[in-house]
Amino acid sequence: VITPAILVNKPSDLKNFIHSFSMYFNRIDIDFMDGSITSSTTVSLDEILNIVANYLSHISFGFHLMTNNITLIKDFIVKLKLIYTKEFNIRTQGFVVYLHQEILTSNQNDNLLEFILSNLNKESRGIVVSVEQDIIDLDFYNDFSEVQVMTVQIGAQGGKFEKEALNKIYLLKDYNGVISIDGGVNLETAQII
């Protein structure tokens, strides 16, 4: 399955991309960066929520949060759940929030993992393994519906495809969930994959 990802810093661009992609895809991923773990920033999380609220009835969204701001992550999840509950008047979650393994496993962020596990159902939890991160205990990943392996450096849209990252997929062979890759996929790299 190919899922387009949007990484932009203007709300009007986000709205235009979602509108264009929604004609062809039923799932769209949105990348968020606040400059805390990358040198770049994107549209704010509040702006993202305001825009995606108009598409919830027919598009499923993934939210790739490239931030180490724990308060921002928690606030986003609370607001996201409220929007979905209000829009559909049900508690089912039709989205995935992707968080980076190094943020969730940091000793300083111990309560973030607990917050994620208690506030998002498994289908709404995704974990991202960066190029420089190693695969850890498989039991850890089983709390997530998807493991996304980065094949470019974080925040490097259009960056060089790191084919060594594909070795992580082999290490995840016993994982019981979706394994996806993020970054640098094109006609040339698709043949390697």
Image (spheres, helix red, strand yellow):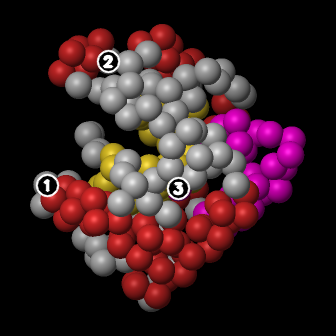
Three-letter amino acid code at the position of disc 1: Tyr
Which corner quadrant holds the C terminus? top left
CB atoms of marks 2 and 1 within 8 Å: no
Q: Secondary structure at mark 2?
A: loop
Horizontal arrangement in the rendering, residue 143 relative to residue 6 (left or right)? right
Q: Residues within 10 Å of mark 1 (few under 14, many from 20)?
A: few
Q: Earlier in the sequence, mark 2 or mark 1?
A: 1
Q: Is residue 69 visible?
A: yes
- Compared across the picture, whether 96 is left or right of 37 comes to left
Gap in Å between the C-alphas at discs 2 and 1? 23 Å
Q: Is residue 29 magenta?
A: no
Residue lying furthest left: 23
The residue located at (28%, 46%) in the rendering is 4
**Disc 1: which residue:** 24
Q: Which residues are magenta?
A: 97-120
| Vertical arrangement, residue 98 with respect to residue 54, above or below | above
Residue at 27%, 17% in the rendered image: 189
Q: Quadrant of residue 22?
A: bottom left
Query: What residue would you read off at disc 3?
Result: 97
User: Residue at left 46%, top 78%?
Assistant: 84
**Viewer-proximal residue, 180 or 8?**
8
Q: Residue 26 appears at what percent x and percent y? A: 24, 58
Q: As shown in the figure, which amino acid type bears the numbered disc 3?
A: Val
User: Residue sitting at 29 percent across and 73 percent down?
Assistant: 55
Main SS, magenta region, reads helix
State the image quarter where residue 79 is shown: bottom right
Task: Quadrant for the N terminus, please.
Answer: top left
Q: Mark 3 or mark 2: which comes first in sequence? A: 3
Q: On the image, numbered disc 2 is attached to which residue?
A: 193
51 relative to 118 in the view: left or right: left
- The percent coordinates of residue 67 (x first, y second) are 62, 49
Mark nearer the N terminus (1 vs 3) = 1
